Amino acid sequence: MSATIQSGLERWFNDGVPAADCIVEDAADGITIADAHLDPSAFAPADDSSSRLVLPYTPFPRQREFHRSPAKYRLFGGAAGPGKSKALLMEAILQAHEHAGANSLLMRRTFPELEASLLLYFRRDVPRELYRAFNDTKHVVSWWNGSTTRFGYSRSENDIYQYQGAEYLFIGVDELTLFTLKQWQFLTSRNRCPVPGAFANMAAASNPGNIGHAWVKSLWIDKQAAPGMERPGEYDPEDYAFIPARVWDNPIYATDANYLKTLHALPEHLRRAFLDGDWDVFAGQYFSNFDPARHVERAERIGFADWWPRWISMDWGFEHPAAVYWHSQDKTRTVTYREFVRQHMSPRNLAHEIVERSRSERISNVYLSPDAFARRTDESSIAEQIGDVLGANGLPRPVPADNDRVGGWLLMYQMLDAGEWTITENCAELIRTLPSLVRDSARVEDIEKMDGDDAADAARYGLKSRMRSQTGANAPFDQRIAARVTSNDPTIRAIQARKAELDEQRRSGPISFARHHPRPGAPLR
Ligand SMILES: Nc1ncnc2c1ncn2[C@@H]1O[C@H](COP(=O)(O)OP(=O)(O)OP(=O)(O)O)[C@@H](O)[C@H]1O
Ligand SMILES: [Mg+2]
């Protein structure tokens, strides 16, 4: 659905129809709000402006553009300092005054961040006589017209559900890339308003970077459904508007030599993100050495030879997309040459898709995410279901992939650095995902888990598992067992598994005195 809104300032900038309950006027000294519901005793000017209050805010041109945008979901900024947070706060206030009795919500990820930005600006810049009350515990402003604005935060993923049950005409999210896609999607479900004629809408402000970088970039910059979206087919680019703004759009900072100097002095990738608003780089990026010009090639140019080994790696997912990669190798480099990423596909159907795409290729191994081997019910595990189809079609049954995350990311990084890993152009999801991965702030050698990292996980399984099988490093117990269970016949599989277990026990068990000198009644091993 595409929709338009006469948001915030547009009504009065276009000097169109005044809103039902409130007249808002643009003036040199700020925004004048004349509200039918204003309590005259709350302020006592002497002249006929007694029912008019001034919100001391004159938007800068970019902020004005943001307020006037008719999109349902707006993203403002993309760089440091243009006045993003302030514009969000003002948008909430304006919409609260456009429709009496409407609720609005302003969000930051943590309370200290909320205190230092939106709440600070509210306390500092919004005159006391403009609102009926402010509940300091709940952080809710009650306006004279019965509307409210709530300041909220969601430190943990699930804290967002405390907003369940409420409905908001306007929701503003500051520093959106600190939020997850799930949190944003939940908030969109709270974005509705029973006030007749009101158009529910949301806006966000953000710099590039952080855990939300990939999905925010998808929705607003690349204009496509984000990985991990439940119903990607319903994504309508018309609903999303990105209003870029940089520090030079804020006259206060544009002439602040000190602040500009600080931004210029940032390390290259941070400077590009915060000063230029470049969404292709950002803080904490793990694969800062990934360069499509160097690492991506057209498949036709590779010149595959029949004798090159080929293998498949796969990250199983149902709610999250399943991601499958095909790899090959010559003497000097590994080539990831095919991709299949699909959501909501059963294990058997997924396996059929793999078979379909692997025809005529000699695949030596299929590495599958280890969690797919868990047996949760009496039914076959995901791995078994996939394995049954692959096996019946002449492909190897899957074995658990090497899930050493830190070692795997490092290997990928080193292979990119040495020019030992090439990705073909058709692996679009992988090419898009790699530059968006950021370091885990609590465990810097690892990558932060996030929605949409399935492609990278699957590729990692492919490179790391292959490397281990070549170097002969010792695989974990489960993997060694699974690697030896190769038959398609269930009885033979059971025998193979039992035999492998016994061999393992024999191999690893301590040299037992009992074995050499069995005591009476001791079980034979
Ligand atoms: N229209 C305006 N009129 C006057 N001052 C403004 C206006 N807009 C923003 N400012 C001031 O400019 C400064 C920066 O604004 P703000 O914090 O909103 O920017 P930001 O883009 O959110 O910055 P950051 O990238 O650091 O989050 C603040 O002191 C704010 O009060
Ligand atoms: Mg800000």
Image (cartoon, rainbow, N blue to C red):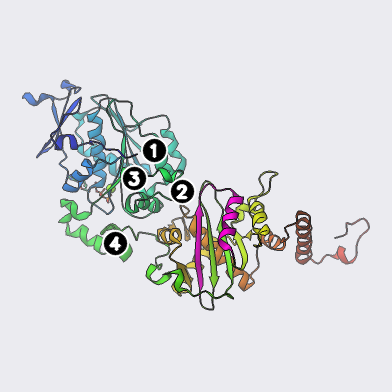
Task: Please state the extent of the stretch shown in magenta in the rendering.
Answer: 333-359
The Cα–Cα distance between marks 2 and 3, rounded to whole angstroms, is 27 Å
Residues packed near mark 2 inside 10 Å, few (<14), some (14 to 19) or many (20 plus): some
Q: Which residue is mark 3?
A: 113
| Residue 45 to residue 350: above or below | above
Q: Is residue 351 magenta?
A: yes
Quadrant housing residue 281:
bottom left
Indicate the quadrant containing the C terminus: top left, top right, bottom left or bottom right. bottom right
- Compared across the picture, whether 262 is left or right of 283 comes to left
The Cα–Cα distance between marks 3 and 4, rounded to whole angstroms, is 23 Å
Q: In the image, which is nearer the foreground, mark 2 or mark 3?
A: 2
The Cα–Cα distance between marks 4 and 1, rounded to whole angstroms, is 30 Å
Q: Are marks 3 and 1 in contact (CB under 8 Å)?
A: no
Residues packed near mark 3 inside 10 Å, few (<14), some (14 to 19) or many (20 plus): some
Choose the circle earlier in sequence order: 2 or 4.
2
The structure residue drawn at horizontal position 30% and vertical position 59%, both measured from the top left corner, is 278
Q: Position of residue 406 (x, y in %)?
A: 52, 62
Indicate the quadrant containing the N terminus: top left, top right, bottom left or bottom right. top left
Q: Which amino acid, mark 3? A: Glu
Q: Are marks 3 and 4 in contact (CB under 8 Å)?
A: no
Q: Which residue is mark 4?
A: 272
